[in-house]
Image: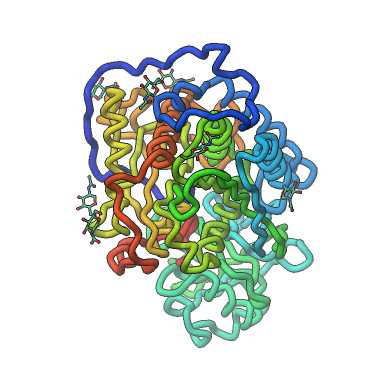
Amino acid sequence: MGIRSTLPLCAVVAGTAALQIPLLSPHQQAPLEAADKTKPLINSSALQDLISGDRLFTRAKKLFDIAKLGEDEYNHPTRVIGSAGHEGTLAYIYESILQLGDYYKLDNQSFPAVSGNVFESRLVIGNSVSKSAAPMGLTPPTQNKQPVHGDLVLVENEGCQIGDFPDSVSGNIAFIKRGTCPFGTKSEHAGQKGATAAIVYNYEKDAVQGTLGTPSPNHVATFGLSGKEAGPVLEKLEKKDKVDAIAYIDADVKQIITRNIIAQTSEGDPNNCVMLGAHSDSVAEGPGINDDGSGSISLLEVATQLTKFNVSNCVRFAWWAGEEEGLLGSDYYVATLPEEENIKIRLFMDYDMMASPNFAYQIYNATNAVNPNGSEELRDLYIDWYKDQGLNYTFIPFDGRSDYDGFIRGGIPGGGIATGAEGIKTKEEEKQFGGKAGEWYDHCYHQLCDDLSNVNMTAWIVNTKLIAHSVGTYARSFKGFPKRTSSVASSAYESEAKYHGSMLYI
Ligand SMILES: *[C@@H]1O[C@H](CO)[C@@H](O)[C@H](O)[C@H]1NC(C)=O
Ligand SMILES: *[C@@H]1O[C@H](CO)[C@@H](O)[C@H](O)[C@H]1NC(C)=O
Ligand SMILES: *[C@@H]1O[C@H](CO)[C@@H](O)[C@H](O)[C@H]1NC(C)=O
Ligand SMILES: *[C@@H]1O[C@H](CO)[C@@H](O)[C@H](O)[C@H]1NC(C)=O
Ligand SMILES: *[C@@H]1O[C@H](CO)[C@@H](O)[C@H](O)[C@H]1NC(C)=O
Ligand SMILES: *[C@@H]1O[C@H](CO)[C@@H](O)[C@H](O)[C@H]1NC(C)=O
Ligand SMILES: *[C@@H]1O[C@H](CO)[C@@H](O)[C@H](O)[C@H]1NC(C)=O
Ligand SMILES: [Zn+2]
């Protein structure tokens, strides 16, 4: 999941009975049998009963070991696309499904992606090392991956026109205000005018953590800077005082091929599919055990236990790649789906971050007023389940921050659940879910410490059971669920979705 805060729009309180997590009984984990005799028709509660915390955590340990494959290149565990850790993740998912025999048809879907990696960076303004400076995603390195020294040159307006850049920027460092046009455009203009680096400073006091987006040969090494740090610098520059700086970024931007993994049941009506997804990749900064190792593993476990049943409707699992680079895999999947295939997908369910350590049970507020018909029925399935368990839940905006986005734009009903990223838990939520008010839901969000200690098992088991329930319900029947009519996005969603994946780009 991406960078914006996900403060709940409102909170809903259900009953107060505590959830009982059934103990694992040994016979439930018997080896999978070949489909040579008739299996019982899928039953949601029977599938939920097969979800075990031990099995989820065993897989998490495996995934963390896989993330360590990224250490050679990145000096720490990671499963970012293009890394050995991500390749290992794909192999693990693929092998796990392959072991289930002919219950699933497996597919790799390859697509091109740009992968950026910042190894080291530093910005010194005057005599002090900047605290807020953050290299932009997909930034090129400074020349020869060496520090560059120059004067800061104030750019007029917001640097959206090449004419905003004075000639004196050549050989120096452009100092540009955030706003109006994408960061990538500003960096490109700076490069065209011969700047050796660029700094985009915020109009708000916060830091700027953004991305340059699609690489351009004219991009120069670019930092974001907080408005707070920029203030005194601006004062000097406006008085025509000289401010010098040293910028240094060691980074790589490369074009790679990565892939989505899709597994579809061999049985079940292929014209009426329930589809669900999680993302297989992490950010470069860490191993991504909660984001989204948790969702990826939940899907693997549900897919494994589902093989003990027969299904009426087809079930299609997806592990997306490149989510962290801007929903690349899921976008590619929907964009390349022929119309006749699009309408076979009755709904898409997104499972990104199931086990945040300071969790809330969050449901995407996907309504039929704004989203394809059926999105609200899915939302209500989640509500009813939490209520039945006596658990509280909150609504969060359904605004384009994860892999459901392409589906909604493609007219496919969607929704999902999450447990929170960098948003701050409220006092009310502390009462509803436990944990700590005033802190992030996931204090290791997009960081190195998103490791084995960064999952709350209670939340993870609860949500994996809910995933099992969603699969069990729709694999059995779509009774009462709206039929597909169109493969076009509603304009209402277009105007409400202000994000496309994780990073700010403007
Ligand atoms: C959910 O979204 C709808 C718009 O589709 C809005 O009217 C409603 O207030 C939202 N509910 C919550 C709890 O945020
Ligand atoms: C699964 O169910 C379908 C119809 O619902 C039936 O034709 C098929 O034989 C069943 N398969 C198994 C393995 O039970
Ligand atoms: C589903 O399984 C549960 C046991 O897990 C059982 O009590 C229930 O009767 C089953 N429902 C159906 C419709 O078969
Ligand atoms: C699909 O990808 C997996 C994981 O990388 C790989 O092991 C497998 O050989 C690939 N299968 C095909 C048919 O390309
Ligand atoms: C639900 O939230 C209320 C406070 O709004 C709290 O008293 C109750 O204990 C919570 N229920 C559970 C199961 O945590
Ligand atoms: C998980 O969350 C529950 C409920 O807030 C809490 O009781 C439990 O201690 C947490 N577990 C861990 C390992 O933090
Ligand atoms: C949505 O689906 C329901 C149930 O199938 C149907 O009654 C309703 O007319 C549909 N609404 C729209 C706008 O298509
Ligand atoms: Zn995520």
* Residue at figure coordinates x 46%, y 27% from the top left: 47
Query: Is 343 in front, or is 141?
Result: 343
Residue 247 screen position, x and y as percent: 66, 62
Would residue 258 be seen by someone viewing this image from the given angle? Answer: yes
Left-right relation of 262 to 397: right
Instruction: Using the rendered view, name the quadrant where residue 487 is placed.
Output: bottom left
* Residue at figure coordinates x 22%, y 28% from the top left: 14
Ligand 5 is found in the corner quadrant, namely top left
Residue 213 screen position, x and y as percent: 56, 67
Query: Is 19 in front, or is 46?
Result: 46
Left-right relation of 35 to 41: right
* Residue at figure coordinates x 60%, y 82% from the top left: 168
Query: Is 232 in front, or is 359?
Result: 359
Where 488 sits versus 412, above or below? below
* Residue at figure coordinates x 31%, y 24% from the top left: 389
| Quadrant in which the C terminus is drawn | bottom left
